[in-house]
Amino acid sequence: MSNDDPWSGFSLDPRLPQHAVLRASDTDRSVVQQLLGQAYADGRLDRDELDERSAAADALKTYGEIPALVVDLVPVTLTTTGSGLPVPLNQADVRREAERRYAAERRSAVLGFIGPTLICWAIWVATSFGSGGFDPYFPWPLIVMAVTLVNLLRTAVGSRERIEEHVRRIERQRAKALKRQRKILPPGF
């Protein structure tokens, strides 16, 4: 079990609705006990709370019972959206993911400029050869270059704004995932 993701120690993710009805193993109950023990050691649980939750952990039968025992001790946020895409848990992760998405967008814009430009110029040069040799005509690849350059410049120049836009999108995805999660968690969360 990792400190970054306490849910990784379970055989199956108890937060997912498809796992809620499945029976938990001794290993899963042990993971809950470790989480409770760590919370007690950190001073987040008193002795009575530890004893009460430990007894409940020993008695738990399904994965669906696990989140209720640790909801106030570890982030219960789902780490994936319905599509399987990661949902960052904190602002630093959100920022890193936004910067990663911007870097991919910038790389795509550069390739979207270079690829079509090279192909169009190659076609232009190849079609400029006629029976009399090289006979250049209107350099139409300049139009393609101008259009793709606009996208490249828009992406490169507005880096801060693009990253903030990605942050907003990620936070909307995160909010939707949390909303879906609240629907699947038992009452009392």
Image (spheres, helix red, strand yellow):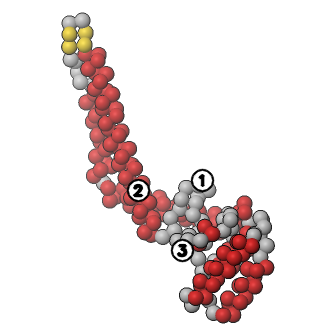
Q: Which element carries disc 3, helix, strand or loop?
A: loop
Residue at left offset 75%, top offset 69%? 24
Up-down relation of residue 80 to residue 146 (above or below): below
Q: Residues within 10 Å of mark 1 (few under 14, many from 20)?
A: few
Q: Give the left or right position of residue 49, taking residue 143 as reference.
A: right
Q: Which element carries disc 1, helix, strand or loop?
A: loop
Does residue 189 appear in the picture of this structure? no
Check residue 100 in the rendering and tell me which mark sits there, or answer none. 2
Position in image of residue 27 (x %, y %): 71, 72
What separation in Å lies between label 1 and label 2 (alpha carbons)?
Answer: 19 Å
Q: Which element carries disc 2, helix, strand or loop?
A: helix
Q: Earlier in the sequence, mark 3 or mark 1?
A: 3
Q: How many labels sit on residues?
A: 3
The kind of residue on which mark 1 rests is: Ser
The kind of residue on which mark 2 rests is: Arg
Residue, disc 1:
83
What separation in Å lies between label 3 and label 1 (alpha carbons)?
Answer: 25 Å
Residue at left offset 36%, top offset 56%? 162
